[in-house]
Amino acid sequence: MSRRGFTLIELLVVIAIIAVLIALLLPAVQAAREAARRSQCINNLKQLGLAVHNYNDQNNCFPLKDMYPSVSGPSCGWTLSWPLAILPGLEQQSMFNAFNFSFSTAGADFDTACSGGNGWANSTVGKSQINTLLCPSENLSQHPDQANGGFGTMNYYGNLGGPGVIATHTGLIIPNNAGVVPTIGSSYGLGGPVTFASVIDGTSNTALFSEKLFGYPGVAITVSSTNAKRGLFPPTAASAHDSGSQANALAFVNACMAIPGTTASTSSNSGLSWTKAYPPYTVINAYTHFGAPNSLACSNDNASYGGPSASLPPTSNHSGGVNVCCGDGSVRFIKNSVGLQAWWALGTRAGGEVISSDAL
């Protein structure tokens, strides 16, 4: 009695067919997963936008980028960041109640200028992680503050202005009018609370939040690296980019784009902490509408943390662009190829620009 079976060639053909099917299906599966992550990111930004509207109902303004000086240790620049203000709106009332607003957020181990270690009074809240502040497409498990005990981090940042080099502090999340440091960019420290009524461009045409990837701690990032958008680089040439001239601002953007591929990053501090802020250290909790989304970040006013006149664009692992939450709570996906004029207009609250529906 003969036995029938598969020949070796038939088995190889079947295996080849299965391999082809897997090769065809795997990108589709990965795309579906990224679509789910992007959807969650959009939901996170909507939650932040809703929390800001709840904050406005009680305070009649947008939250400030930072609250300097804090009650304790006013000589220390480290102070309170904007997420603390909207904790109740993120269903984190217990965490808000647990935070001691009489103290700062950083201790002597974090910054030598902060004597007394008063930041540890809030270390329990500071080391807590709020999932709403994390983009699920972030694929770096370690963030810059791991060496200091692992304070909680975030991927969402406030719009400081757009661009800072043309109209400094025209965003919605701006610094307190503290005058804590010498003027940076001709108008640093001249901020203050922003009301909804002052957004004359319209809240639907003004960015509130966007996203940024973590910095890469302890790793030398170069412009040619796949992680270049996690760094901060020096531009190829200095320019009077805070003079109010759009031509000078464009020249600065071009200088950022022309940085040689071997140039090393000077900073890895995005994602440092969701509770900490420092008035001139823009990169910690804000971004600027200067360079286009996912372009190189570059600064010549603060090489380590990026000042308000630096180009600190939002960055993400989403294919082709970033999510942006506008002042009305709506979320848009802005492509990397967006025109700079439209991108700058989205960053200003009172620039008088008209943004066409097909420009973003």
Image (tube, helix red, strand yellow):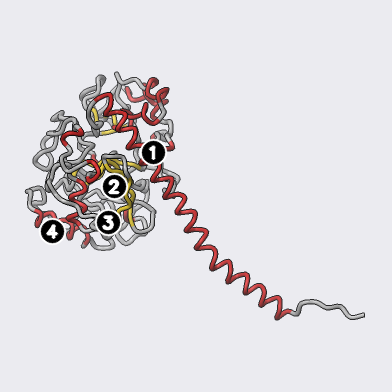
For label 1, count other residues whose C-alpha is less than 10 Å away and answer few (under 14), some (14-19) or many (20+): many
- Earlier in the chain: of badge 4 and badge 1, it is 1
Q: Which residue is mark 3?
A: 295
Q: Which residue is mark 1?
A: 133
Q: Is the residue under label 1 in contact with that under label 3 (CB below 8 Å)?
A: no
Residue 187, percent from left and from top: 10, 38
**What label does residue 267 carry, if any?**
2
Image vertical order of residue 132 relative to residue 73, above or below: below
Q: Camera-side residue: 187 or 223?
A: 187
Dividing the picture into quadrants, the one containing residue 348 is top left
Q: CA distance from mark 2 to mark 3?
A: 15 Å
Q: CA distance from mark 4 to mark 2?
A: 23 Å
Identify the element where label 3 is drawn.
Answer: loop
Q: Which residue is mark 4?
A: 251
Q: Say which of marks 1 and 2 sits in front.
A: 1
The amino acid on which the numbered mark 3 sits, given as a three-letter code, is Ser
Left or right side of 140 for 52 = left
**What label does residue 78 carry, if any?**
none
- Earlier in the chain: of badge 2 and badge 3, it is 2
Q: CA distance from mark 3 to mark 4?
A: 15 Å
Q: Say which of marks 4 and 1 sits in front.
A: 1
The amino acid on which the numbered mark 2 sits, given as a three-letter code, is Ser
Q: Is the residue under label 3 in contact with that under label 2 (CB below 8 Å)?
A: no
Res 320 seen here: yes
Q: CA distance from mark 3 to mark 1?
A: 22 Å
Quarter of the figure with the C terminus: bottom left
Q: Is the residue under label 2 in contact with that under label 1 (CB below 8 Å)?
A: no
